Structures are given as C-alpha cells and as structure tokens.
Amino acid sequence: MHASLAIVGGGPAGMMAAIRAAEALGGGGRIILFDKNERLGRKIYLTGKGRCNLTNLRPWEEFAPHIHPNQRFLRQAFRAFSNEALIRFFEQDLGVPTVTLQGRRVYPASLVAGDVARALERRVRELGVDIRYRTSVGSLSELDGFDAVIIATGGKSYPVTGSTGDGYRLAAEAGHTITPTFPSETALHPRNYDPELSGLEMKKVGLHLYVDRTLVESEQGDFNFTGDGLESGIAYHLSRRAVWALTNGQQVDIVLDLKPALTEEQLQGRPLRSMLPKALAAPFLRAHPGLAASNLPAAVKSWKFPIDDYKGYDRAVVTAGGVSLQEIVPKTMASRLRPGLFFCGEVLDLDGDTGGYNLQIAFSTGALAGNSAAAYLLSLPR
Ligand SMILES: Cc1cc2nc3c(=O)[nH]c(=O)nc-3n(C[C@H](O)[C@H](O)[C@H](O)COP(=O)(O)OP(=O)(O)OC[C@H]3O[C@@H](n4cnc5c(N)ncnc54)[C@H](O)[C@@H]3O)c2cc1C
C-alpha cells in the first residue's frame, strides 16, 4: 500500500507543496489535491494587476522587514527555497522566463499572470498528482484515511477566488489557535472624503500614520486616491497597522506630505501651483479653508486625513492573522499538535507587504511543507 497525502487548496502554496511532495516521493505515494474551483490558482490570475508579481529579489536582510508579524519564522523556509531559487524554478523547471522591474519586483516576462498559474497547474498534473476540482473539504474528518495532510487554503481576502477562511476551521479542529484575522494591504477611507480626489496618482510623497495622535509609521513613495480612499503603494503598507488600530477602536489619522524632500522653510514663499499637481489644488484648498500664505508650507507638508473606515476582505490583498506560528515548526511547517499535519501559505499568521512578498511566502512555505510531508510519509513503517 502506498502512503497517501491530501493537500487542501490548490493556490500557489498548495501547488508548490504538491510539486515538491511528488518529486520527493518519485511516484512512491498517492497525492490528492482538493480545490473548490474548476481550475487551480484562481487568485494568481488577479495578482499584480494581472501581471503577477512573483517575488522580490531583495536579499533576506532587506526582504525580511516586509514580512509580518514574525519574519524569523519565515527564515528557514526562505533559505530552503529563496527568491533566487524560485526564479530558477520558474525559468528552468516550468519554462517561464521572468523579468525584474522597478523595486526589484519579479514578473513573468510575458507580464501575463495566467502563464504562472497554468505552468504550475501543468507541472502538478505532469507529476501525476490526482486533482479533485470543484471539491470543498469541509472537515478534517473527511481526510481520516490519509497518512498526511497539508492545509493550504489561503486566507479570506477576495473570497470570490475560493479563499473563504475554511483553513482556520480545519486547523481549529486539530486544536490549533487562530490569531485574530483582519484585512491588510487595503484601501483606507478618510472621513468626509472629497470625491474629486478619486483618480489622482500621488508620486514621491510621504505618508505618516498616527494612532491616537502618536506617530507610529512613515513611508515615502507613491499611492493613489481612488473611489475607496487611499490605496496601493505606501498607503497599503500603512494599512496593516491602521486597520488593526481601527478594529481596536483607536483614532487613526494619515498625514500626507506633498513635498517630503523639502523643509517648510525651503517651501516658504513658493506659489501653490509649484507645490502640488493642478488637479489637487481645488480639493487641497477646500480641505484648508481660509489658509494664509504663511501657513501654506505647513499645510503642504501635513495634510491630515482622519480615517474612519477601510475596505474589508472583499477587496483586501491579504489577510493578516491566521494559524498561530507558535504551534508550527518553522523548519518543516509541521503542526506541533498533530503528527502528519502541515500548513503553508496565507492560512498561517504570516503576511507581507505588496511587492511580491506574499507569493514568496506561499512558495517558500509550500515547498517546505511538500518536502516535509514527503519525508514524513517515507519515515512511516510499511
Ligand atoms: C488582487 C490581489 C492581487 C495580489 N497580487 C499579488 C502580487 O502581485 N504578488 C504577491 O506576492 N502577492 C499578491 N497577492 C497575494 C497573493 O495572491 C496571496 O497571498 C497568495 O495567493 C496566497 O497563496 P495561498 O496558496 O496561501 O492561498 P490562495 O491563493 O488563497 O489559495 C487557496 C486555495 O485554496 C482553495 N480552498 C480554500 N478552501 C478550500 C476548501 N475547504 N476545500 C478545497 N479547496 C479550498 C481555494 O479555492 C484556493 O484555490 C495578491 C492578492 C490579491 C487578492
């Protein structure tokens, strides 16, 4: 009798786990991959605005600060399957050439996210993994006959893609603690939001996040005003702490610095039109009624947006919180509570900033879970 492995969830983490487990078992085991959808990796098709930002090429020391809440937990999985190894895997094993663009973000050279999803799914099939499409696993007890189980169900953001938080329930069945979840990398909505701001792209500006009037985080770079508020880029990076504070009933303010490279003194005497894009002038003046010329530099450097809401799981790029890392072995992704149970991807209490970090988390932890599950199966008495 062959040892058998069930993988719940065919996103990037589950597919990577299936590939590594199948390679390690070399046909000596039965692997069944369950996914709710009619094709695998449905969320991948949406990633990177349809281009799929596969990973980020920064070295670990620069990569790690973009991982939350516990960068140390990821270190061993990243060492075992790094960003550079991921690129080699795509180029050499899957035949998907890559390109590195601004901010060391790596994409498929075609800039077509579907190429990534299809190449992974093809490899899973080539390796003889038995894929059960349109099959939702509702309880761990449905998998009782399997020798090992990998949970790769993702978080609960963009639930239309199949990621509806089922893994938290499955993990809890095995006794695991679920760290409270909240949407992250999501739009922040200001009180009395001026609709005329929507559609404006802000370049090379500064954003400061205040929680209960205390400065907690600052970022410089780009973001957009959209119909939902402050979105993408540096606004997303601040959203993790901002959403957490809002869910705790704290006061959240974002302060926009339109000229981060210059001091108020250096801006003194300059005309308004030299300090902001034309389309921003009317909303800026509406937000600062009766502004005297002498106060203009201070207003340009500290335009305050009190935040009263945020976009929920329907629109959040990632789910923060999840299966507690305390109960997972970082070297193997194995459950400390139940032998033969493994976790990978966004279902874990592990998330990254936008910029390719979340997919690298999924691929690194997926590869490690797949290898570890195979090693576990091979260690079982026959
Ligand atoms: C709009 C958008 C853009 C993004 N862009 C990027 C980007 O460019 N770069 C980046 O690094 N990250 C990006 N991300 C984040 C990234 O896509 C996710 O972090 C990543 O997909 C998580 O991988 P996963 O395999 O853990 O989970 P998921 O991709 O969520 O996959 C989970 C799978 O499990 C299946 N499933 C769930 N429950 C069950 C069940 N009970 N039974 C059977 N199957 C089940 C689902 O159908 C799904 O296929 C983006 C996210 C969004 C929403």
Image: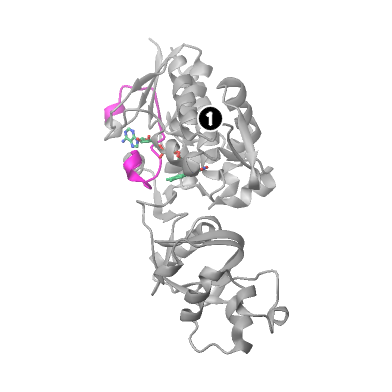
Q: Main secondary structure of the magenta part?
A: loop
State the image coordinates of residue 343 (x, y, percent, origin top left): 44, 36
In which quadrant of this rendering is ligand 1 seen?
top left
Drawn side of residue 23 relative to residue 154, left or right: right
Question: In the rendered image of this protein, does residue 235 appear above or below residue 59?
Answer: below
The residue shown at (69%, 47%) is: 61
The amino acid beneath tag 1 is Ala
Question: In the rendered image of this protein, does residue 23 appear above or below residue 48?
Answer: above
Q: Secondary structure at mark 1?
A: helix
Determine if residue 278 is in view: yes
State the image coordinates of residue 177 (x, y, percent, origin top left): 39, 48
The residue shown at (54%, 40%) is: 53
State the image coordinates of residue 43 (x, y, percent, origin top left): 41, 38
- Whether residue 125 is in magenta: the answer is no
Q: Which residue, given by chain and number where applicable, does mark 1 sit on?
A: 367
State the image coordinates of residue 164 (x, y, percent, origin top left): 32, 43
Residues shaded magenta? 142-164
